[in-house]
């Protein structure tokens, strides 16, 4: 149970800040996206096209018949948010002036969330004192332990700046710590045993892209029986009826 909680926390922190940052700096003219923005589920992950016919279609809105763009199989695409529409999962990309892709037509590329899914049973709570980090006076943040490219580096990064919530030890005994919310948007791993080493061994080859599976609750916004809409209607009706009853009681009391 503890490992499951750690995995969920890491997946949440990897996705949420990145999405919030992107939402803050990018706007879209996509009408469906703007109309249902509050009902979408944040994702923020890289995918590659994997359509049955050798390509993946980008639609103006979920369920649309006409294509707004085409992605050849193997092409990468960043999917910002997802929704469930008439029983099918769709992802929104800012590419092609903003469009929608069926999630069963893409594969998720290996990333920090993939690493967490693969190694969650090896994670543990970090209880060290950041000796190596403090001695180095800086750190490199990697998307996952063994990644080929760093995310960002700091010359004055210390353990007191951002605490490692979760730790993991690689096969060579190096201890890694997961940090989140740096600059409000960066989540990644620091090699606590060797914080400023740019030449750490690269783990490879990476696992193949995999099918995406939703890990958050989606409400089907394409169904007329949307429970959220029904709830809102019921609440509005209840308030209206309650207001009428109160007014009648009030005026009755005022009548001689």
Image: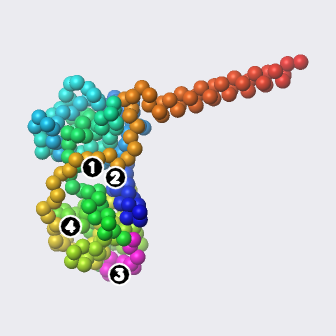
* First-in-chain label (4 vs 2): 2
* First-in-chain label (1 vs 3): 1
Work out how far the residue at label 4 is from the one at label 1, CA to CA, in angstroms.
19 Å
Please rate how many residues cluster around mark 1, counting C-alpha atoms within 10 Å: few if below 14, some from 14 to 19, many from 20. many
Query: Quick check: marks 1 and 3 in contact, CB under 8 Å?
Result: no
Work out how far the residue at label 1 is from the one at label 3, CA to CA, in angstroms.
33 Å
Element under disc 1? strand
Residue found 18% across the figure and 72% down from its top = 200
Q: In the rendering, at what x and y percent does residue 243 appear? A: 68, 26
State which quadrant residue 119 falls in.
Answer: bottom left
**Residue range corresponding to the magenta coloring:** 125-135
State which quadrant residue 221 falls in.
Answer: top left
Q: Is residue 68 visible?
A: yes
Work out how far the residue at label 3 is from the one at label 4, CA to CA, in angstroms.
22 Å
Q: Mark 4 points at which residue?
A: 146
* First-in-chain label (4 vs 1): 1
Q: How is the image coloured?
A: rainbow
Q: Name the residue under label 1.
A: 45
Q: Is residue 25 visible?
A: no
Query: Quick check: marks 2 and 1 in contact, CB under 8 Å?
Result: yes
Say whether residue 117 is left or right of residue 71.
right
* First-in-chain label (2 vs 1): 2
Q: Nearer the viewer, mark 1 or mark 3?
A: 1
When the figure is inspected, residue 47 is found, relative to residue 56, above or below; the finding is below
Disc marking residue 131:
3
Work out how far the residue at label 2 is from the one at label 1, CA to CA, in angstroms.
8 Å
Seen as rendered, the residue at the extreme right is 256
């Amino acid at each position: 149970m503890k490992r499951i909680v750690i995995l969920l926390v890491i997946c949440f922190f990897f996705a949420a800040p990145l999405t919030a940052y992107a939402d803050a700096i990018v706007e879209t003219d996509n009408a469906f996206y703007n109309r249902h923005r509050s009902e979408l589920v944040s994702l923020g992950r890289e995918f590659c096209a994997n359509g049955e016919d050798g390509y993946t279609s980008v639609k103006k809105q979920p369920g649309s018949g006409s294509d707004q763009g085409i992605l050849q199989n193997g092409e990468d695409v960043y999917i910002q948010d997802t929704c469930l529409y008439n029983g099918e999962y769709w992802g929104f990309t800012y590419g092609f002036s903003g469009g929608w892709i069926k999630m069963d037509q893409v594969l998720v590329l290996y990333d920090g969330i993939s690493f967490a899914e693969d190694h969650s049973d090896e994670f543990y709570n970090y209880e060290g004192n950041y000796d190596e980090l403090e001695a180095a006076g800086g750190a490199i943040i990697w998307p996952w332990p063994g990644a080929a490219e760093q995310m960002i580096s700091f010359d004055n990064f210390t353990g007191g700046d951002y605490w490692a919530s979760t730790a993991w030890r690689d096969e060579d005994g190096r201890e890694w710590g997961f940090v989140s919310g740096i600059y409000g948007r960066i989540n990644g791993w620091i090699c606590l045993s060797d914080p400023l080493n740019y030449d750490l061994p690269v783990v490879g080859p990476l696992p193949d892209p995999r099918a995406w599976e939703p890990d958050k609750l989606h409400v089907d916004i394409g169904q007329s029986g949307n429970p959220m809409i029904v709830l809102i209607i019921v609440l509005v009706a209840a308030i209206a009826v309650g207001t009428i009853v109160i007014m009648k009681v009030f005026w009755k009391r005022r009548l001689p």
